Image: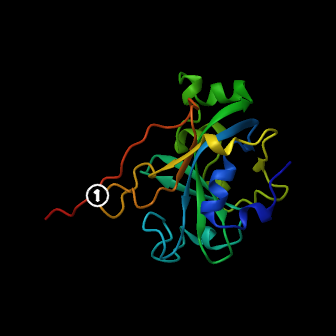
Amino acid sequence: MTLDRSFFARPALVVAPELLGCTIVHGGVTVRLTEVEAYAGEGADPGSHAFRGRTPRTEVMFGEAGHLYVYFSYGMHWCANAVCGDEGEAQAVLLRAGEVVAGHELAAARRAGVPERDWARGPARLTSTLAIDRAHDGVDVCGDGPVRFEAPAVPVDPGSVRTGPRVGVSGPGGDGTAYPYRFWIEGERTVSAYRPGVIRRRTR
């Protein structure tokens, strides 16, 4: 069953753990999500791109739930987020990692030389495997567009869901522990390695 707009039109912290076990389909490949991160939006979450308000880059985040927000990271990689919440709130869930469950030949070609475990183990690897890039920024995942999310045939056991600090995102105290907004399925080999955030200080 394809996830509809009502699924995404809720707070990101509610949507994020419920996306675990769901699949995202694009470009002939299907990935089962095993790790995600929630971002609470403008004024509420210093780790969010939308924390300081609207910009041309973040406009999609302020729009209707059920669209993709795709951005370029470190000048090298694309990362994809599902926009959540009410319009104007700029909440989103980063798709951090997953397991390829269909389209293995295409995935192998796109990730040539990479072990299967790592095809979608990390947000940039996930988008590369699914062939998602800037052209998909703003795509409606609840309509007849090229990207869709499907509910799992067997829901994830809530007892296997873990939560902790987001990868590479600092916060009060510098370690990000004030924002335990990362969710993953315990025991899944495709979950990415945790890396704490680093506070970057200005140099004179």
Residue 105, percent across and down?
A: 71, 24
Pointer 1 local density, CA inside 10 Å: few below 14, some 14–19, many at least 20: few
Which residue matches tag 1?
199
Residue 91, located in which quarter of the rendered image?
A: bottom right
- Pick the front one: 72 or 22: 22
**In the current view of this chain or complex, which residue is farthest to the front?**
159
Residue 29, located in which quarter of the rendered image?
A: top right
Judged left or right of residue 1, residue 110 is left
The amino acid at mark 1 is Ile
- Pick the front one: 25 or 111: 25
Q: Is residue 102 above or below residue 44?
A: above
Residue 33, percent across and down?
A: 65, 42
Looking at the rendered structure, the number of numbered marks drawn on it comes to 1
Question: What's the residue at 56%, 58% (across, down)?
Answer: 38
Residue 180, percent across and down?
A: 47, 56
Question: What's the residue at 80%, 59% (across, down)?
Answer: 142
- Pick the front one: 188 or 46: 188
Residue 85, percent across and down?
A: 67, 69
Judged left or right of residue 120, residue 193 is left
- Pick the front one: 172 or 26: 172
Q: Report the coloring of the rendering.
A: rainbow
Q: Secondary structure at mark 1?
A: loop
